[in-house]
Image (cartoon, helix red, strand yellow):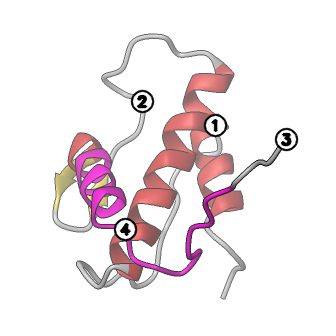
Amino acid sequence: MSRSFRLHAPLAIDNSAAMRAASVVDTFRICDGLYLIGALEHGLTLYNQQVRAHNLIWALWELERAKRCKVGRVAVIGAGAAGLEGRGAGGKPE
C-alpha cells in the first residue's frame, strides 16, 4: 500500500486563521487594546477559563503575525485561571 501525505508550510500566513483570530479577539474586546475574559460567560470551569485565555493570546499572536495588528505590552489583571493561563501563554516577562 502506498500512502501520500500533504505537508503544509508552517510559516505560511493562513488567511482563514487570521479570520478566526479576528473573530476570537472581537469576542473578548471591550475597546481597542482592552479585553475581558470570563466576566459575562457561562460555564466558569477552570478548564473553560484556561481555554478562553489561551484562545485570546493565540488570536492576538496570529493577528500580529499576519500584520493585522500590533501587540505591544500586555498587562494581566487578576490571578484567576484565565489570568494565570494568559500570562503563561503570553511569553516571558519584561
Marks 2 & 1, CB-CB < 8 Å contact: yes
Residue type highlighted by circle 1: Gly
Q: Amino acid at mark 4?
A: Asp
Which of disc 4 and disc 1 is earlier in sequence? 4
- CA–CA distance in space, label 3 to label 2: 50 Å
Which residue corresponds to mark 4? 14
Q: For mark 3, what is the residue? A: 1
Residue lying farthest to the front in this orientation: 1
Residue for badge 2: 38
Q: Earlier in the sequence, mark 2 or mark 1?
A: 2
| 48 vs 21: above or below | above
Query: Residue 39, image x and y in percent?
Result: 37, 28
Q: Which mark is residue 80?
A: 1
Mark toward the viewer: 3 or 1: 3
Q: Are marks 1 and 4 in contact (CB under 8 Å)?
A: no
Cα distance between the residues tagged 2 and 1: 10 Å
Q: Position of residue 53 (x, y in %)?
A: 53, 45
Queried whether the magenta region covers residue 46, the answer comes back as no
> What is the span of residues highlighted in magenta in the rendered image?
5-25
Q: CA distance from mark 2 to mark 4?
A: 28 Å
Three-letter residue code for mark 2:
Gly
Q: Secondary structure at mark 2?
A: loop
Please tell me which residue is depicted at 72% across the width and 79% down the height of the picture: 92
Element assignment for label 1: loop
Residue 10 vs residue 57, the one in the foreground: 10
Instruction: Give the label, 1 or 4, closer to the camera.
Output: 4
Q: Residue at x 24, y 47 (%)?
A: 23
